[in-house]
Amino acid sequence: MAPNTRIILICSGKGGVGKTTLTANLGIALARQGVRTVVLDADFGLRNLDLLLGLENRIVYTAQEVLEESCRLDQALVKHKQEPNLSLLPAGNPRMLEWLKPDDMQRIVGMLAKQFDYVLIDCPAGVEDGFKNAVSATKEAIIITTPEVSAVRDADRVIGLLNTNGIKPVQLVLNRVRPKMIESQEMLSVDDVTDILALPLLGLVLEDEQVIISTNRGEPLTLKDNISPAARCYANIAKRLQGENIPLIDPAKAGRGLRDKFMRLMQTKIF
């Protein structure tokens, strides 16, 4: 294993909070910075990372065949068509869950760490065997949650398990932030979530319908110079991981910016 390789588990506890979407967009964003990056789909029961990257039709071998030694690692890796610095190692058959052990995950990640600067592990939801296998092979973690009470409670449980396993640093990404709802106190604020979870905030991702569109197309927002709010947020998270000092978005100012733009539009005289 290369000593400088960063092995990062992207996890949530609760399903459906944007974990796989973050993995795909963060992988692309890092690769665009010239960093050799691989994303590992560790959700063997519900594989989706290949779809979000638009690589589902190019899969020949998976992590399963690598472990069974019926193919080489380089045969199973799928290089992204538009971003050659990014590769995907797809999840295998759901039946892998019956026999996969922490040693197997450590072996796979160890092989990847010899070739890449970043190994991003897309962790399955929950805290069962799939989570335990993924944790066994990681060095650090990113917790992604939404500003909802149930999601934050599940994230808190996962943080406790990560701490028990000695994973550090653990950083937070707050997803689907809606400034207007925060202002009207209909959603937990950023301060509320960071106070509860007591984690350093790596980034915010604003609510953005372009995320759904890009996901359905299999084209992550960070693949191009996209000006959508979420695309900028993902790109900034990647830069912070690389050590750049990028200021965090202030949701209150983001909300005011939209309102101010609307008010200026309404005040414009039409002759």
Image (cartoon, rainbow, N blue to C red):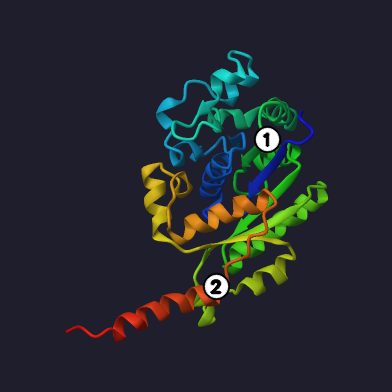
Name the residue at 65% across, 37% down: 119
Query: Of 221 and 194, which appears nearest the observer?
Result: 221
Q: Amino acid at mark 1?
A: Asp
Badge 2 element: helix
Badge 1 element: loop
In the rendered image of this protein, does residue 75 appear above or below residue 28?
above
Which quarter of the image is occupied by the C terminus? Answer: bottom left
Q: Which mark is residue 251?
A: 2
Q: Position of residue 125 (x, y in %)?
A: 60, 48
Q: Position of residue 120 (x, y in %)?
A: 63, 40
Identify the residue position indicated by label 1 in the image.
Answer: 117
Name the residue at 61% across, 20% down: 73
Q: Amino acid at mark 2?
A: Pro
Query: Of 258 and 109, which appears nearest the observer?
Result: 258
Name the residue at 36% across, 83% down: 263
Query: Of 254 and 112, which appears nearest the observer?
Result: 254
In the rendered image of this protein, does residue 107 appear above or below residue 25?
above
Q: Position of residue 196 (x, y in %)?
A: 71, 69
